[in-house]
Image: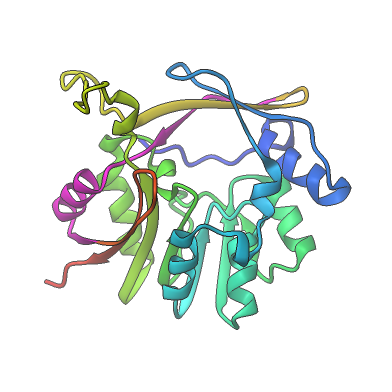
Amino acid sequence: MIANSLLTPDKDPMGSAIADYFHQRKTDRLRVFSSQFDEDEIPVSQLFRTLQAMPPLERTALKMSSGHILDVGAGSGCHTLALQARGKKVDAIDISPLSVEVMKLRGVHNANQINLFDERFCGSYDTILMLMNGSGIIGKLENMPQFFFKMKQLLNPGGCILMDSSDLRYLFEDEDGSFVIDLAGDYYGEIDFRMQYKEIEGETFDWLYIDFQTLSFHAKQNGFQAELIQEGKHYDYLAKLTPIQQ
C-alpha cells in the first residue's frame, strides 16, 4: 500500500532545508540514511537549480510537457517555475508543508500540500510530471497497480506521464562486467531512506528506482505503454507512459 499521508513541519527535514536555503542562502547538511547504503547527503542548492543547470533529461521532459500539467513532488518549485516562464498552466504538489510555503514565496501560482495518492485528490491533466527520480514515490513494485489506477483517474484522454528513474544494477556490477543480483530477494531498486536536517528527523520511507524493462512490463500489465525517450550518462532515463486505448 502506498503511503498517502502528509508531513508536518517537525517531521519535514527536506522542507526545513529548502526553507533555510531560500531565506538565508545557506544550509546545514541534509543527511540521508539507508539500511542498504552508507550515509549520504543532498546538496540543497541543487534543489533550486535553474533551467540552464538542469540535466538534459529534465530539460527534455519540460519541453515535452503540454496542456494542463501536474508537477508531482515539486520541492522548491524549480520545474514548475521553468514551465510557468514558458506560459504553461501548472499545478505543483508536495507532501512537505515547508516546501509548499517556499514555492508560493518563489512565485509558483498554484502550489498545494497534497499527497498524489490521497483518494480525495482529483483533477484532469494532460501531462503528469514526475522528475528527480519520479518513480521513487511508488515505493515498491507491488504498488504499481495502485499507481497506474491513480494515473488513469487523473489523466485526460491523450495525456501522458513523463517520469525519470535510474537502474541501480551498476551497484551490483562485478569487476568482469557481470552483475551479481539475488533474484530470489526483493527487487534491487526497492530502497528505504530516512532524512535528517539539524535536529529534525524524518520517518523512514520506501523509494523505488526502476529499470526501464521492469517499468515497461508493469505498465503493460496495468494498461499503459512505456516509451523510452532519452537515456542519461549513468543508467538514468526518461520514460513516457500513456494509457493503451481500448
Range shown magenta: 201-227
Is residue 206 part of the magenta span, yes or no?
Answer: yes
Residue at the spot 15% in from the left edge and 55% down from the top edge: 220
Residue 21 sits inside the magenta stretch: no
220 lies above or below 186:
below
Direction from residue 116 to residue 50 in the image, left or right: right
Instruction: Report the side of 116 relative to 169 (left or right).
Output: right
Q: Residue furthest bottom?
A: 87
Q: Residue 201 appears at what percent x and percent y?
A: 67, 24
Farthest right residue? 24
In this rendered view, identify the residue nearer to me: 121 or 162: 162
Residue 72: image x %, image y %?
Answer: 51, 56
Residue 228 in view, yes or no: yes
Which quadrant of the figure has residue 92?
Answer: bottom right
Number of numbered discs on residues: 0
> Does the rendering let one see residue 125?
no
Rendered view: 215 above or below 151: above
Name of the residue lying farthest toward the left: 246
The residue lying at 39 percent from left, 49 percent from top is 233
Q: Position of residue 179 (x, y in %)?
A: 21, 26
Name which quarter of the figure residue 163 lies in. bottom left
Asked whether 114 or 41 is in front, the reply is 41
Say how the picture is coloured: rainbow
Q: Quadrant of the N terminus?
A: top left
Task: Locate the C terminus by quadrant.
Answer: bottom left
